[in-house]
Image (cartoon, rainbow, N blue to C red):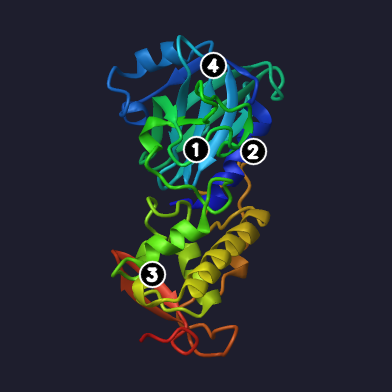
Amino acid sequence: MPELPEVEVVRAGVARHVTGATLGGVEILGRRVARRHLLGNADLTARLLGREVQAVRRRGKYLWLDLSPAPAPEALVVHLGMSGQLLVADADRSRARHQHATFDLVGGAAGAGRQLRFVDQRTFGGLALVDVVPDPFAPTGSPATSGTGVAARDGAGRPLVPATIAHIAPDPFEPAFDPDRVQALLRRRQSAVKRSLLDQGLVSGIGNIYADEALWRARLHGERLGSGLPRARVLELLDHARDVMGEALEAGGTSFDALYVDVDGESGYFARSLNAYGLAGHPCTRCGTPIVRERFMNRSSYFCPACQRRR
């Protein structure tokens, strides 16, 4: 599943094309893409038609489009799932395989004859039109979540976020992110530090790939208990998580196959820079010890047994 850098690459690309554009035509095909919209595809199509995209924003792995009021502000949340893609293409270009939704763009930076397309091979992703609520993590007048455009705000000046993700904590790139708060909560837990990094209610955006990479950089084993770590070590780990995701963002994200691509259909290349994830049996680039793979929460953990000792 895409993590923060991959979703941010998609968000930034979509924002360049659709911010300020009006959805002049909407086509939604199949049952699964709008399965979270209980009134069905026809109702969702009618509600989206003619709306202006005021901003394209993200929190952690979650992406949404702020839409003009009709009659009140709403957000179109895009769940990428395992294989969801948002592509911008010419309207006369042939339909892509597994294309489940098409939005004709009028105005904005995209120019005439352009479309935003939602493509999803495995159909684990989808679209949902959601009410927006004040961001519980952002104080009055604070900057909004990562995004482009003018974010909607309530009467007190707090930025609005989709109600379905209001419980998701800020990610390390947001102004609302408070590393001291995160480290204090993490160190109260009698649970593995990697499990805490993956908890989107504590800090969002960090998935399995970047958790393993941050732990490798911090020389910490993922099974170490958060309660046994000093404050400085946890803050260092959070810094590493931000750094590795920032480097991945500059590289266009991490692509292992053709399912993750940016808005122009291009893959990221940060996989070439990984030091732990997916490298079982390869020598650690720091000490030469072979990287080990272990099962963890129905997935895999990769670490260096010499650099990241289990206590």
- Camera-side mark, 1 or 3: 3
- At x 45%, y 63%, the residue is 183
The local crowd at label 4, few if under 14, some if 14 to 19, many if 20 or more residues have their Cα within 10 Å, is: many
- Above-or-below relation of 218 to 114: below
Is residue 224 toward the left or the right of residue 85 in the image?
A: left
- Above-or-below relation of 244 to 160: below
Front-most of 49 and 26? Answer: 49
- What is the CA distance from the residue labelled 1 to the residue labelled 3? 26 Å
- In percent of width and height, residue 41 lies at 35, 18
Which quadrant of the figure has residue 150? top right
Front-most of 236 and 142? Answer: 142
Front-most of 189 and 250? Answer: 189
Residue bearing the label numbered 2: 13
Residue bearing the label numbered 3: 193
**Which tag, 4 or 2, sits closer to the chain's start?**
2
**Which tag, 4 or 3, sits closer to the chain's start?**
4
Mark 3 vs 2: CB contact within 8 A? no
Which quadrant of the figure has residue 91? top right
Residue bearing the label numbered 4: 68
